[in-house]
Image: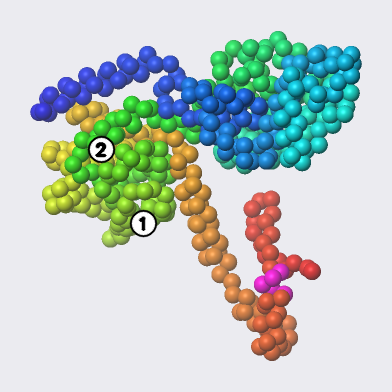
Amino acid sequence: MDIDSKSLFANSYFQALEEIGKNLPPEHSHGEQYEIVSKVAYLIGVGKIFFEKEHEPPKIDIYEKLEKEKKARIIRNLCKLRTQLEINFLRVCHGIQREGRSMMAMPEYLPTECFEQLDHDGVQIYVQLKEPSKFLFHINRTIKERINNCKDLFPDWINWAYLSDIFIMPDGLTEAGTKAAAQFYYENQKYYPYKQYMNWPADDQGNILWCDEKFVTLLYQWNGDEFTDLSRVSDVSDRTKANIYTFIEDSEKCIFIVDCENSDPYNLCAAIRNLDPEELSKIDKIILFDDVHAASAWEMLASYIDIPVEYVLIERLKDNKSLADVKVVARTCKEFYENKVDSFVLVSSDSDYWGLIEEMPGAHFLIMVEHDKCSHVLKETLVNNGIFYCYIDDFYAGGGDEIKADALKREISHLLGASLDLNLAQLLEDALDRTRIEMSAPEKKKYIKEKLKDRLCVIIDDEGNVGLEIKKK
C-alpha cells in the first residue's frame, strides 16, 4: 500500500471510528470497571444471584473475596437485615404483637442466616427486643461503629467520607430519623440499587451500580463535588485493545521501545497490566531508555510485568542536554536491521520521533502517548499515515498503583537515610564527651542496646516535622 492509499485508508478508518463512538451511550465510551460497585453491592446486601448473572455489574469473584473478610460480612448482614426490616416493618410488628413471635422466628421477613452469621462473627444482635424500631436503632448504631473497618477494602484515592456516608442512615438512632428514612425509601424504592437501602438522594439515574465510573461520578455529585480522574474508574475501550492485539498478532517480531523521559512509568505499568497476558506473550522484550532526570520508578518496572525488560540508563554529557532520542533512534535501527524486529510499540509523546518513523517505511509502528504531552500535529500526522496511536493514561490506573506505592516508599526510605545520617556509637561518644562521663567499651555497647536502640522512636508533629526521642520505660 503506497503512502497516499495509506493516508486515504487511515482517514476513512478513523472517521468511521469517530462516528461509531458518537452513537455509543456514555457507558460504552470506555472499558468499564466493576471493582468498586461490586464491593458496594456486597456491603449493602445485594443478593448473590446478581453476582452470578453474567450481564449484571456485580462480579462473583469480588463476592467470593469479600465473603472471606469478617469485617465485610458483618456490614453485609447488618445491611441486609436493615433493608428487610424496612420492607417488612409492619409485618414484623404484627408478628411480635399479635403472634408472639421473635424476630429470629420470622425467616420470611428477616433472613435467619444473617443472624447466624453475625453471631458466628461475634456480633451480638439483640433479637430479644420487642420493638422493631429499637432493633433498627441497634443495627444503625452497629453499622456506624463498624463501617470504618471496611475502609481498606477500597482504594486510597476515593473520598471515604463520601463513601462511608451511604451506609449511615441519617439520624438513624431516633424515631423521627428512622421514620423519615423509611418514608423516603418507600416513596423511591424503585430507584434504589437492587432495592437495597442506602443513604443517597434517590433519583431516576438508572442502575447507579452499573459501573465504577457511573457510581463514583454520582457519589461525588451527591456531595457537591466533581470526580475527574476517570482513569481510576475506567479502562480504554475494547476497540483500542483489539487494535493493539491485532498489531502484535500481525508482527513477526515485536518489541517495546520506551523513551522514559517522555513517558510515565505508572501509566505504562497500568497499561501493560490491563492488557491480555496471552496477547502480550508475543512481545519479545521492552527496552527502557532511562534518563537521569526521568522518574526513578523506571528501574522497578521489570518487577511488575511479565515481559522481559532491558534497562538502559543514559548518562548526560551536558546537564541540559538529553541523549535519549539519539539512543532510541540508533537502537531502533539496530533492532530492525540486525535483529529482524519488524514491529515497534514506541512509547513516547515526543514528536521528534516522527523522523525515525518516516525514515523506516519497512517497519511497523504503534505509538503510545499521553494526553497532556502529545501535540495535535503529531496525532494528525500519525492518522494521515495510517499509524495507530493510543493514550497510555486512558488505561485503568489501578494497574499502576502497586508500583507507585512501592516507588514512593523506596524514595522516602532513601531520603530518610540521607537526611538522618546518624551513627548511635558516634552519637554516644559525642554525648559522653560533652557531659564528661566515662564508660567502658562493654558499658557503651550495653547502653546503645538497652537505652538507645530499643527505646529510640520517631516523633512527627501535625506539620510533618520529624524528630527523634528516647522513650521512657
Residue 451 lies, with reference to residue 112, above or below; the image says: below
Residue 454 located within the stretch drawn in magenta: yes
List the residue tagged with mark 2.
248
**Of 86 and 236, the residue lying toward us:** 86
Query: Where residue 462 sits: x, y (%)?
Result: 69, 50
Q: Can residue 165 be seen?
A: no
Residue at the disc numbered 1: 292
- Mark 2 vs 1, N-terminal side: 2
User: Mark 2: which secondary structure?
Assistant: helix
Query: Type of residue at label 1?
Result: Val
Quadrant in which the N terminus is drawn: top left
Residue at image position (44%, 35%) is 396
> Chief secondary structure of the magenta span?
helix
Q: Which contiguous range is marked in magenta?
A: 451-455
Q: Is residue 19 above or below residue 356?
A: above
Asked if labels 1 and 2 touch by Cβ distance under 8 angstroms, the answer is no
Which residue corresponds to the image point at 49% horizontal and 47% vertical from the top-left? 402
Query: Which residue is nearer to you in this view: 109 or 56?
Result: 109
Q: Position of residue 27 (x, y in %)?
A: 46, 21
Crowding near pointer 2: few (<14 within 10 Å), some, many (20+)? Answer: many
Q: Is residue 21 left or right of residue 51?
A: left
Q: Position of residue 433 (x, y in %)?
A: 68, 84
Question: Is the image coloured rainbow, by chain, by secondary structure, or in one colour?
Answer: rainbow
Disc 2 to disc 1, C-alpha distance: 31 Å
